[in-house]
Image (cartoon, rainbow, N blue to C red):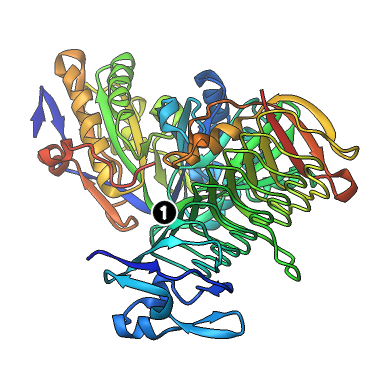
Amino acid sequence: MIINGVHIDDTFAEAFNMRGTRVIITAQNLKWAYNAANAMTGFATSVIGCGVEAGIEKELTPDQTPDGRPGVTILMFAMGSAVLMKQLETRMGQCILTCPTAAAFSGIEGSKEEVTPISLGKNLRFFGDGFQISKQFGGKRYWRVPVMDGEFITEETTGMVRAVGGGNFLVLAESQPQALAACEAAIEAMRKIPNVIMPFPGGVVRSGSKVGSKYKAMFASTNDAFCPTLKGLTKTELSPDIESVMEIVIDGLTDLDIRKATRVGIAAACELGAKNGIKRISAGNYGGKLGQFQFHLRDIMADPTLNDLTAEIQA
Amino acid sequence: MSALTFTLKTALQQRLDLSALTPDQLAGKSRADIAAIQLPYGRKQLRVDEVFDLHGEDTANIVFANSAAKLDYIGSKMKSGTITVNGDTGAYLGFQMGGGELAVHGNVDAYAASGMSGGLIHIFGNAGDFLAAAIPGDRKGMKGGTVIVTGNAGDRVGDQMRRGTLLIEGNVGSYCASRMLAGTIGVLGTVGEYVGYGMRRGTLLLTSKPAMHATLQDCGAHTLPYLSLMFKSFGELPSKFAKIDKNRVQRYAGDVANDGKGEILVLQ
C-alpha cells in the first residue's frame, strides 16, 4: 500500500488493556485551566516510569462545563485500577487543589454498568480540616474546600472504564526535520479526535524501545533496528535513505477511538508525502504475543467508516 | 388514559387522612377496590366513595379536585407518579415522600415535605409552619428532593432539615433554618427574626440582609463559583431561582453557638 508516495508497511501496532478515566478541569479562564491540566498531566508519558499516561483531550466552552467556566478535559490511563486511583488522587492533590481558581469534575458518568466510580475529590476534602462543605445537586456530590484564594470545588467521584493503551505508528523520513514536521502534522489532526491522547512530549516519542537489554538491570532498551546511526551495525529495519524515525503513541477509551486517531494521523503525515521526505509508515509490536489488540495499518487506512468521529463515550 | 380524579363532594367536619391514595398504593387496583378503601376520619373511618366522586383510571397520575384544608397526608410516602391538587390541603403534604411529583394549586398547612427524601413538590400557594421540618420526636426534617413554594411560608421553615433543596419565592416567618443539619434553602422574599437559630450546617440563600442574632458571624463578601454550579443544576426547574446568574454574596457563618458550620449567603 502506497499513499502519496509513502509506503505503508504490512504490519500492526500491538496494544494493551488499560484502565482509563476522564476529568474536567475548569478555571477562571482557559489559561489557568491549562496551567492546572498541564501540571496534572505532566510527567505522565509512559506507565513504565510515571505510573500513568495522561494528556489533555480537548477544550470545553463555558456552556459545556458544569460550573459555566472555561475548561479542558484530561484523560489518564494506567495498567491497573489501583495505580490509576492512586495517581489520580495524588495528582488532584498536588496539581488541581494547588492551582488558583481550578475546579475538577467528573468526565465519565458513573451510571452506566461498565463505569466504575472512583474518588476524585473524595479524600481531598480532609484538607478542609472540618471546614469543608458537601453539596448535592442533581444527584451528584460536590465538595467545597476553603483555600486561600476562596473555595476549591471538586466533584466527589469520576468514572473509570476499561480502555486501550499503546496504539502507535512510526514515521520514517529522509531527515530529522522532515520526520518531525510529519509528526507535528499528524498530532495536530489527531488532537481533534475525542477519547484519545498522545502522552509523549508534543505527542511524539523518539526513543522507541525493544524488550530486553545487554544490561541485566534493564527491561527495555533502544530499538536498534530503527536507529538510523546503527544501519551498518545491527539487523536494521531501515533502508539507506532513512535518516530519522519518530513514533506516535496513542491511548484511547476504546480500540475504535485508537483506530480513528491512527487513520487521521497517518493520513496527515502522508499528506506531506514522498516529496517532503516521508518514505514509510510502520508500527511497533511484540510479534502479536503480548497485547490484546492489534491495529493493522493497512486495514485501518482502507476502512473509510473510521472517518465517522462520533465518540461512544462522552464527557 | 385520563388521570384518576378524586373530587371532594362533602364539607368535612374532621380531618381526613389520604395517605392510602398514592400512585404506588393504587397501582393495579380496580375502581371498586379504590372506592372501598377506608380512610381514617377523626375516630371513625370513611369509604373513599363516601367523600369523593371518582373519574378516570390512570393510577400513576392522580388529581384531587375541590381539595380542602382538612385533607391531610396527601402524597405521603409516594415513590413515583404524579399527584396534582386543585385547592388547599391540610398538614403533612408529601410526608416521607421518596419520589415522583406533587403539585398543589392552593395553600398547604403545617409540616409539608417533612421527612421527604426525593422527588419534587411544587406549592403554587402558601405553605404553613414547619415546612420541611421534623415532626416532634423525629430528629431530621426533609432528607432529599426539591420543594418549590411560589408563595410565602410560615415559621420554623427547614427546622432540622438534613438534605435537599427548598426554594421559596415569597416571604418566610421566624426561625427560618433553625437547627438545620444540611441542605439548601433559598428565600427570595424576606425572613422573620431568629433566622438560622441553632443552625449546624447547610446553606440559607437570601436576597436581603435579615435581622441577625449575636451568634451569626460575618465572613465578608465573596464570589463563590459553587453558586454558579448550583444555579446551573436548577436548570429547568419551574422557579425564579433557575434564572439567577449571580454568585457574589455576603457570607455569614453560624450558629456558632451550635457548631457554626452553617452559612447564610446574602446575594449582592
Corner quadrant of residue A128: top right
Q: Is residue B100 visible?
A: no
Q: Depth check: B110 or A127 in front?
A: B110
- Placement of the C terminus of chain B among the 4 image quadrants: top right
**Residue receiving disc 1:** A161
Image point 70% across, 63% down: which residue? B134
The chain under label 1 reads A
- Residue A33: x percent and y percent? 53, 25
Q: Depth check: B136 or A76 in front?
A: B136
Task: Report whether A238 appears left or right of B110.
Answer: left
- Placement of the N terminus of chain B among the 4 image quadrants: bottom left
Task: Report whether B221 appears left or right of B78.
Answer: right
Compared with residue A69, is residue B95 higher up or lower down, i.e. above or below? below
Image point 47% across, 63% down: which residue? B99
Q: Depth check: B148 or A303 in front?
A: B148
Secondary structure at badge 1 equals: strand
Question: Three-letter amino acid code at disc 1?
Answer: Val
Image point 73% across, 46% down: which residue? B176
- Residue A201: x percent and y percent? 45, 27
Q: Depth check: A108 or B264 in front?
A: B264
| Category of crowding for the residue at label 1, using alpha-carbon neighbours closer than 10 angstroms: few (below 14), some (14–19), many (at least 20) | many
- Residue B87: x percent and y percent? 46, 56
Task: Report whether A116 appears left or right of A235.
Answer: right
- Residue A174: x percent and y percent? 24, 18
Total tally of numbered discs in the picture = 1
Q: Is residue A89 visible?
A: yes
Compared with residue A119, is residue A245 higher up or lower down, i.e. above or below? above
Corner quadrant of residue A304: top left
